[in-house]
Image (cartoon, grey):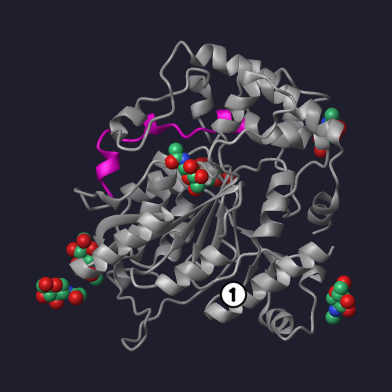
C-alpha cells in the first residue's frame, strides 16, 4: 500500500499543475478543432437517447473502440507526452494498488486525456439496447435526467483566462460516478448519505437507483424528493428483492448512456460508509487505470440450498455448488471499460437475481476481468468500532470502505471522524 500512501501525501507543486493545464488545453484544442466539424456532444435533458447514440466524437478513431486492447491510441493524442508520460501511465503496473506513476506532470494531464479516448462506444450496442433491460423489452426510466456534471459550470481557472479553459471546465466530467442502490422507502438512508459521504463534491456525481413502486402516494413522494435533490433514477421494473440484478444493470446502463465520461464508477448500497475524501484524493492523484474491478473479494462461496435461507437458490436457477469469485455488492469500484463491458455482456446473458454474484462473478469471468482485492483499504469491524468509540484516530487509518449494514448514526459519526481529522491535519 506504500504506493497509495506516497501518492496521497504528495503535494503537487503549482508549476506541475500549470504544465498539465497547458497540455490539457493543447490536447483539447486539437480535439475541439476536429469536433466542431461534427455533432455537438452536449445533449440536454429531454432529448431522446437516439440522438445521443449517434454522438461519436470524431476525434475518437475507430481503432480505439477496441477497449480490450490497451495499445490502440491515436498518435495525435500521444504527442504531448513528456518523457514518455502517456505510455508509462498506461502500463498496468502490478502490485494491487490503484496508484500508478507518481509524477505530477503525468498525473495532472492524464485523466482528461484518457477520458477522450475511453468514451464508451455506444455503437457497439444493438439499436434497441436502451429500451431493453436483460429480458425486459419495454424498459423505461420513470425518473431520469441527463446531467452527469457534478458542477454547475463555474469557471475555476480564470487566472489563465482563455476561452478554451472555460470550455474544458464547463464540460468537466466527474472523477467518480457514485451509484447507490436504494429501496423506494429508504428516505432517511438517502438523506444520511446526502449529508455525509455523498455530500456535494466537485469531483463526484451521486445518483440513487430505485425501482417502480405500487402506490401512487409513494410515487408522488419519490418525485417530490427528486425535485428537491435531483439525484434519483427510477426504472420501470418493480423494486423487489429478486429484481436486484435489474437495478444493477440499470445502474450500468445509466453510466453507459448518461455518464460515460466518468473516470471511475463506484457502486454502493445505502447502508455503507465510503471514505470519499480519501478515495477521491487517491483516485485523483493516481494515473487512470483500466480493467479494474476493486472490492473485497469473496471466494468459494457455497450456493445456499436450504429453503429457509434468504439466499436460497434452486439448482435450475444456478447449477454449480459454488459461486465464482465475486464482489459483495455493498462497495465496488469499476473503471469505465469494465463497467461498459459488464453492461454489454449482462444484457445478453440469462437473468440471475443475486446481482453481485451475477455481475462481478459470472459476467466478470465471461469478460475476463479479475478482481483487485481491497486489502487494507477495507476497514475491519474492530477498527471501525474503535473509531466510533474514539479509541482510534480516523486519520491514522488509510481506508476507502468499512463493512456494511451500518446504522444511520454510525454513518454520521464516521463522517465526523474522517472530516474532523482531515481539517485538523
Ligand atoms: C511519468 O511517469 C513515469 C512512471 O511513473 C516516470 O518514469 C516518468 O519519469 C514520468 N514522467 C515525467 C515527465 O515525470
Ligand atoms: C447538473 O448537476 C449539478 C449538481 O449535481 C448542478 O450543479 C448543475 O447545475 C446541473 N446542470 C444542469 C445543466 O442542470
Ligand atoms: C400492488 O397493487 C395491487 C393492486 O393495487 C395489489 O393487488 C398488490 O398486492 C400490490 N402489490 C404489492 C407488492 O404491494
Ligand atoms: C420484477 O420486475 C418485473 C417487471 O416489473 C415484474 O414483472 C416482477 O414481478 C418483479 N419481480 C418481483 C419478485 O416482484
Ligand atoms: C481470457 O483470458 C484467457 C487467458 O488469459 C484467454 O486465453 C482468453 O482468450 C480470454 N478470453 C477473452 C474472452 O478475452
Ligand atoms: C488523534 O489526533 C488528535 C489530534 O491530532 C490527538 O490529539 C489525539 O491524541 C489522537 N488520538 C489518538 C487515539 O491517536
Residue 172 rendering spot, x and y as whole percentages: 57, 35
Quarter occupied by residue 377: bottom right
Q: Is residue 36 visible?
A: yes
Q: Residue 118 colored magenta? A: yes
In front here: 247 or 366? 247
Q: Is residue 386 above or below residue 132?
A: below
Whether the residue carrying mark 1 lies under 8 Å from ligand 6 is answered with no
Q: Secondary structure at mark 1?
A: helix
Residue at point 48%, 17% (across, down):
58
Magenta-colored stretch includes residue 220 = no
Q: Please identify the quadrant where the N terminus is shown.
A: bottom right
Horizontal and vertical percent position of residue 229: 43, 56
Report ligand 3 position as a quadrant. bottom left
Judge left or right: residue 297 versus residue 184.
Answer: right
The residue nearer to you, when weighing 345 against 115, is 115
Where's residue 175, x and y in %? 60, 44
Residue to which mark 1 is pinned = 411
Q: Residue at coordinates 48% horizontally, 53% vertically from top-left?
A: 364
Q: On screen, 35 above or below 245?
A: above
Specify whether 266 is left or right of 111.
Answer: left
Magenta stretch: give its range.
114-133
Q: What residue is shown at x 76% (from left), y 72% (from top)?
A: 394
> Residue 116's x, y, as percent?
57, 28
Residue 276: name its quadrant. Answer: bottom right
On screen, 273 above or below 286? below
Question: How many numbered discs, if any?
Answer: 1
Residue 148 seen in the current view: no
- Position of the C terminus, as image quadrant, is bottom right
Q: Nearer the viewer, residue 161 or 20?
A: 161
Q: Residues within 10 Å of mark 1 (few under 14, many from 20)?
A: many
Amino acid at each position: 500500500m506504500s504506493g497509495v500512501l506516497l501518492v496521497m501525501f504528495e503535494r503537487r507543486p503549482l508549476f506541475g499543475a500549470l504544465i498539465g493545464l497547458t497540455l490539457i488545453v493543447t490536447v483539447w484544442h486539437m480535439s475541439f478543432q476536429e469536433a466542431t466539424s461534427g455533432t455537438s456532444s452536449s445533449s440536454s435533458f429531454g432529448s431522446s437517447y437516439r440522438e445521443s447514440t449517434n454522438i461519436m466524437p470524431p476525434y475518437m478513431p475507430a481503432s480505439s473502440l477496441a477497449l480490450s486492447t490497451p495499445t490502440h491510441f491515436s498518435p495525435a493524442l500521444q504527442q504531448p507526452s513528456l518523457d514518455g508520460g502517456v505510455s508509462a501511465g498506461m502500463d498496468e503496473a502490478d502490485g494491487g494498488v490503484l496508484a500508478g506513476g507518481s509524477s505530477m506532470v503525468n498525473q495532472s494531464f492524464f485523466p482528461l486525456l484518457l477520458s477522450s479516448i475511453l468514451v464508451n462506444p455506444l455503437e457497439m450496442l444493438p439499436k434497441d439496447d436502451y429500451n431493453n433491460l436483460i429480458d425486459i423489452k419495454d424498459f423505461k426510466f420513470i425518473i431520469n435526467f441527463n446531467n452527469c456534471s457534478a458542477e454547475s459550470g463555474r469557471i475555476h481557472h480564470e487566472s489563465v483566462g482563455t476561452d478554451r479553459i472555460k470550455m474544458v471546465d464547463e464540460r468537466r466530467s466527474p472523477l467518480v460516478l457514485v451509484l447507490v442502490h436504494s429501496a423506494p422507502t429508504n428516505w432517511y438512508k438517502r438523506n444520511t448519505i446526502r449529508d455525509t459521504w455523498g455530500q456535494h463534491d466537485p469531483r463526484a456525481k451521486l445518483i440513487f437507483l430505485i425501482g417502480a413502486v405500487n402506490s401512487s402516494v409513494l410515487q408522488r413522494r419519490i418525485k417530490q424528493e427528486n425535485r428537491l435533490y435531483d439525484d434519483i433514477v427510477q426504472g420501470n421494473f418493480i423494486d423487489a428483492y429478486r429484481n436486484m440484478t435489474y437495478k444493477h444493470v440499470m445502474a450500468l446502463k445509466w453510466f453507459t448512456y448518461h455518464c460515460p465520461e466518468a473516470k471511475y464508477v463506484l457502486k454502493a448500497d445505502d447502508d455503507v460508509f465510503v471514505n470519499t475524501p480519501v478515495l477521491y484524493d487517491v483516485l485523483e492523484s493516481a494515473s487512470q487505470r483500466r480493467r479494474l474491478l476493486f472490492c473485497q473479494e469473496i471466494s468459494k462461496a457455497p450456493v445456499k440450498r436450504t429453503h429457509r435461507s434468504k439466499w436460497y437458490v434452486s439448482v435450475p436457477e444456478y447449477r454449480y455448488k459454488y459461486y465464482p469469485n465475486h464482489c459483495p455488492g455493498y462497495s465496488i469500484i469499476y473503471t469505465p471499460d469494465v463497467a461498459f463491458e459488464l453492461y454489454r455482456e449482462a444484457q445478453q446473458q440469462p437473468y440471475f437475481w443475486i446481482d453481485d454474484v451475477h455481475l462481478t462473478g459470472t459476467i466478470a469471468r465471461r469478460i475476463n476481468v479479475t478482481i483487485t482485492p481491497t486489502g487494507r483499504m477495507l476497514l475491519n469491524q474492530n477498527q471501525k468500532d474503535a473509531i466510533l468509540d474514539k479509541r482510534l484516530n480516523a486519520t491514522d487509518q488509510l481506508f476507502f470502505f468499512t463493512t456494511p449494514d451500518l446504522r444511520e448514526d454510525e454513518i454520521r459519526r464516521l463522517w465526523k471522524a474522517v472530516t474532523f481529522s482531515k481539517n485538523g491535519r
